Amino acid sequence: MRIDFHVHMGVYTFHNPSVTEWMKESYPEGYEEYIRKYDDPGAFEELLAAEGVDYACVLAELSNATTGLCTNEQVRDFCRGRRRLIPFCDISPNLYTDLGGELRRKVEDEGFRGVKLYPSYQHYYPNEQRMYPLYQAAQDLGIPVLFHIGSSVFRGTRMKYCDPLHLDDVAVDFPDLNLVMAHAGRGFWYDRAFFLAKLHGNVFLEISGLPPSKLMTYFPELGRLTEKVIFGSDWPGMRWIRRNMEAIGKLPLPADGIERILGGNAARLLRL
């Protein structure tokens, strides 16, 4: 089984123009046509099949001041009735007051199967007490919480909010809640993120946005922690999903460890 734990919709309700220009730099030509083509969920499922992906987690994003706005409703409707697509909502503390109640409604009434949080884009610390009702709800519901943890080039980002150390409190206070660090501490905190994943049974590294050729440099002891590492692409920012999965398959890791990274660990968290 191959699972991409981290894809975005190509067409947002609103995309910050600077983000759009950055994205275009990754595509020699045809970026607008490319993302419009895959704004159709059927076409996107075909792309995933061609890239060798069995399931993909599609992430909402309510980061108006930084990257842009991809609403929960967009993601819900995009994934509805699509076997390969797993919807993740975003519950921003800047937009909701009853965080736990809102998450329960999103999961129980609208079919979301995880939540993605963007502390550095929305400017809050993950261990703030106001976030705890959301974590309690997620723990009760048995769904994973995916955090943006690591650097970002986008304007308006405040990186102090996504230091992995803030998740230590959450991991201790919610021992049955699976916490996933998207980008695995990219930039400043590879060692800190790795240590937290090694220390806490409920903390995982998700490697979206990281070049596979650098993984053994960033995490020299990766082979000792393959049961805690999850593949993600960060599509469409990172376009070549199959190529990255194949590159991970060539790393000096045990075969069963590679299988866990490319799908087994995610399947366990998603209860597939």
Image: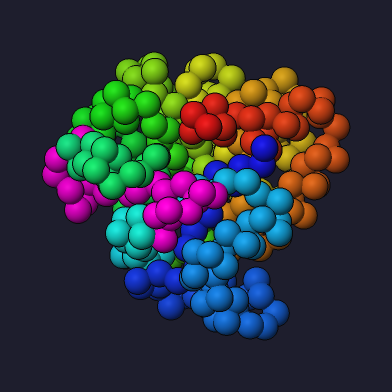
The N terminus sits in image quarter: top right
Dominant secondary structure, magenta: loop
From the top left corner, tell me how far across and down residue 191 is, in percent: 62, 31
- Front-lying residue, 123 or 88: 88
Position above or below: 51 against 193: below
Residue in the picture at 64% in, 62% down: 47
Q: Is residue 113 left or right of residue 51?
A: left
Q: Is residue 142 left or right of residue 226?
A: left
Position above or below: 69 against 201: below
Residue in the picture at 43% in, 53% down: 81
Q: Quadrant of residue 35?
A: bottom right
Residue in the picture at 57% in, 55% down: 234
User: Is residue 97 highlighted in magenta?
Assistant: yes
- Front-lying residue, 233 or 267: 267
Q: Which residues are magenta?
A: 78-100
- Front-lying residue, 270 or 186: 270
Position above or below: 99 against 169: below
Residue in the picture at 43% in, 41% down: 147
User: Is residue 48 highlighted in magenta?
Assistant: no
From the top left corner, tell me how far across and down residue 231 is, in percent: 63, 41
From the top left corner, tell me how far across and down residue 249 is, in percent: 81, 40
